[in-house]
Image (cartoon, rainbow, N blue to C red):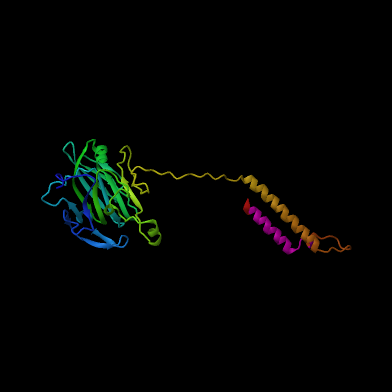
Amino acid sequence: MFRNSYQKGFLTVFSSTGSKPLAIWSTHIKNGHIKRKTDCDLSSLVLEIIGSNVATAYISTPCPGHNSLGIKLPFLTLILKNLKKFFTFEIQILDDKHQLRRFRVSNYQSSTRVTTFLTSMPLCLSPGWNQIQFNLADFVRRAYGTNFVETVRIQIHANVLLRRIYFSDRLYTDDDKPAEYRLFKLMPREEKKEKNVYRPKISQKLEFPSLARPVTPITVHEEGIKMENIEIDEIKYIKKENPEDNLSENFKNLELKVENIKSEIEENVIIKNDDAIDENKIFNEPDAHQLDEILITFQMSE
């Protein structure tokens, strides 16, 4: 389809804002729908693909009658919104061994599997809008040890909102991209302060995992997706106090409390010269109860 076209820079195969966004796409719907709607975050038209089964609701390109897209640009970028439902997309390529290989990426599997003609990989999307960058040449080389020639077919399955799908000859920053290829329009600083502008949370770059060990589901980070990224939380060691130190400190506090109570009792109790000293009179009931409470407290601390 695009084999005889000039391919350099950017090449769009889908744009939700175009007059005919599905001009080169075919639709397949069962127990779902495919329609355009206005997204509240972007305030712009997007394509919604919804289905009870991801296998029976999807769009694909090229349309029947065309065998291959014939796109030789190695970088694929998808701008889509996470609906927190099952979602998958599939890319079919041709390598220099004249073999058709498929890459299937989905958010409902937890490991990477490579077979002769199919590689399936896990994907974890951040909430809201995501920009996924796919280095096709690198994936083909790592998975099959061959060289990427061209992209043959693309299939986008439910459940997702689509804004744009395009190919490029390299990865571009937002400053280097034309305005229509940015997810959000860049605004001057003064205008940013006045207006509440929704910004994408993540630009994800898919990287092919090492197959030496099982791959866990991808976690999204601000730098992009790293399929082998393993984070180890920092371990903080807290120095525990010596129990003997606490015990000696409790003894000191108890002795101090007893001395204070005795001094208060001696001041408040009057002893007559003619009467013999009665210890039961000195330590009357309220004060003895107070000492019992202190003793119980000390035993509990032990």
Q: Residue at x 36, y 53 (%)?
A: 201
Whether residue 51 is visible here, answered yes or no, is no
The foreground one among 156 and 181 is 181
Whether residue 223 is visible here, answered yes or no, is yes
The foreground one among 31 and 28 is 28
Q: Is residue 168 left or right of residue 260?
A: left
Q: Is residue 82 left or right of residue 98?
A: right
Residue 294 rendering spot, x and y as whole percentages: 68, 57
The foreground one among 217 and 251 is 217
Q: Residue at x 69, y 52 (%)?
A: 253
Q: Is residue 68 left or right of residue 289?
A: left
Whether the magenta-drawn stretch holds residue 229 is answered as no
Residue farthest along the right direction in this orientation: 274
Whether the magenta-drawn stretch holds residue 288 is answered as yes
Q: Residue at x 65, y 46 (%)?
A: 245
Q: How many marks?
A: 0
Residue 114 rendering spot, x and y as whole percentages: 25, 41
Residue farthest along the left direction in this orientation: 65
Residue 64 rendering spot, x and y as whole percentages: 12, 51
Residue 117 rendering spot, x and y as whole percentages: 20, 41
The foreground one among 168 and 70 is 168
In the image, the segment drawn in magenta is: 281-299
Q: Is residue 193 above or below residue 61?
A: below
Q: Is residue 38 left or right of residue 258?
A: left
Q: Residue at x 37, y 56 (%)?
A: 188
Query: Main structural element of the magenta stretch: helix, strand or loop?
Result: helix
Q: Is residue 281 above or below residue 133?
A: below
Where, by quadrant of the figure, is residue 74 drawn? top left
